Amino acid sequence: MHIPDIKLAQVLDRFEQIEARMSATMDSDEIVQLGKDYAELKPIAEGVRKLRNVRSEMSDLEAMAADPENGAEMKAMAKEEMQTLKETLPALEKEVSLLLLPKDKDDSASIVLEIRAGTGGDEAAIFAGDLFAMYARYASIQGWKVEVESEAEADMGGYKEIVASVSGSGAYGKMKFESGVHRVQRVPVTETQGRIHTSAATVAVLPEPADIDIGFSMNDVRVDTMRASGAGGQHVNKTDSAVRMTHVPTGVVVVCDAKSQHMNRANAERLLKMKLYDMEKQRIDSERAEERSGQVGSGDRSERIRTYNYPQGRVTDHRIGLTLYNLDKIVAGDALSDVVDALMAEDQAARLAQMEMQG
C-alpha cells in the first residue's frame, strides 16, 4: 500500500513537537507523559524517515534517468539503482504501515490469567493444569513473571480453577488471543478402555493497565469474608481470611483466598477493577464489531478457539484455520509462539486491509 506523503509529514511533525517540548518543559508530570509518547513514536518516526528518504532518492534517480544532458551510461546506472530501490519499497511501505496501525493501548500491559476447567470432569481439570503449565513456560521464555493468586486443585490433579498474574511488558499484546474455550481430545489417565475423550477448559486474559479509570466506587461493592480453602488436617484454615467482593450494579464477583485477609482485600479490589475494566472494554469492542469484521475471532469468551488433538499430534486454531503438528512442543510452551505469532500476523493483516479500505 502507498502511504500518502502528507500522513508521513504529520507523523514527523508530531514527533518533532514532542522533542521540542521535552527540552522546554519543567513540569514533571508532563515530562513523564512526553517520555512515553517519545518512546512510542520514535520507532515510527525512524521508519517514516527511512521511507521518505527512499522515495526522495527514487525521485532524484528518475530525474537523472530522464535528463537529456546525462549520457547513456549515467542513465543506465540511475535506472539500475531505481530498480533496486523499487524492489525494497513494498516491504518498507508495509513495515511503516504496520507501525502506523492504531495500537490497543493495553497491548503493553501485564495481565491476569484465569483458567477454569469446563466439561469433562477430572480430565478437564488435568487439561486446565496443562494449559497453565504451557502459559507459565511461555511467560518464562518471554521474560515475564508469573505469580499464582488463587487456585482450586482437583482431586486427580490439575485445577478446577487457577488465577495468576503475569507481569511483563507486552504480555497482553501477545496473550489476548488466548481468551476462549480450549478443547482437548485424548485418552485420559483415568480411562481404562482406551477411549478418546473430549474435554474443555476456558481461558480468560484480563489486561492490567497502569491506570484504570472506570468510575469505580467501593460504595457499590459488598464485601464478605469466609473460610479459605486449603489442605485438611492440622493445616485446615480456621480463620475467615478469604474475601469475596461483589459489584452490586453488575453482579461481578471475585474471590481471593490466600492466608492474609489484608492481602486478599487488596487483591480482590484490584481484580474486581480489572474485571469491570475488561467488561467495559468488551462492550466497546462489541459496539465496533462491524468495523472489526476482519478481526481474529469474535472475542467472545465462550467461543471455541483451539483444539489439541493428542492421537494426531496436532493443534488447530479454528479462528484462522491454522493446524500445526508439533503438539508436544506447543503444550510444553516451547513452541506456543508458533501459534501466537500467527494470530498476531493475521490480526495485523486484517487491520492493514481495513486501513486500506478506509483510505
Image: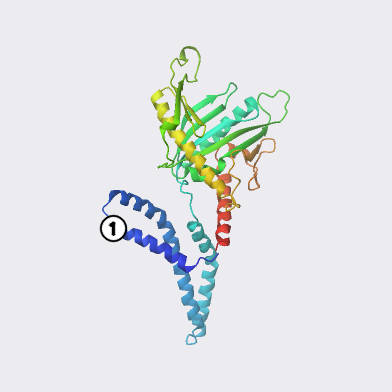
Quadrant containing the C terminus in the rendered view: bottom right
> Is residue 335 visible to us here?
no
Q: Tell me the amino acid under the disc marked 1.
A: Ser
Residue that extends furthest to the bottom in the rendered view of this protein = 69
Q: In which quarter of the image is the N terminus?
A: bottom right
Callout 1: SS: helix
Q: Residue at x 55, y 36 (%)?
A: 134
Residue at 55% across, 59% down: 355
Residue 114 in the image, given as x and y percentages of width and height? 53, 34
User: In the rendering, at what x and y percent does residue 22 appear?
Assistant: 31, 56
Residue 318 placed where, x, y %?
Answer: 65, 44
Q: How crowded is mark 1: few (under 14 residues within 10 Å), some or many (20 or more)?
A: few
Image position of 160 (left or right of 248): right
For residue 107, above or below residue 8: above
Left or right placement of residue 24 versus residue 181 in this view? left
| Farthest top residue in view | 234
Q: Which of 56 and 288 is in front in this view?
A: 288
Front position in the image: 318 or 261 = 261
Residue 99 vs 77, above or below: the answer is above
- Is residue 319 visible in this depiction of the protein? yes
Which scheme is used to colour this image of the protein? rainbow
Q: Name the residue under label 1.
A: 23
Image label count: 1
Of residues 276 and 129, the one drawn nearer to the viewer in this rendering: 276
Q: Nearer the viewer, residue 205 or 74?
A: 205
Q: Residue at x 40, y 27 (%)?
A: 263
Q: Where is residue 153 in the image (x, y as percent from the top left)?
A: 54, 24
Seen in the image, is 183 located left or right of residue 243? right
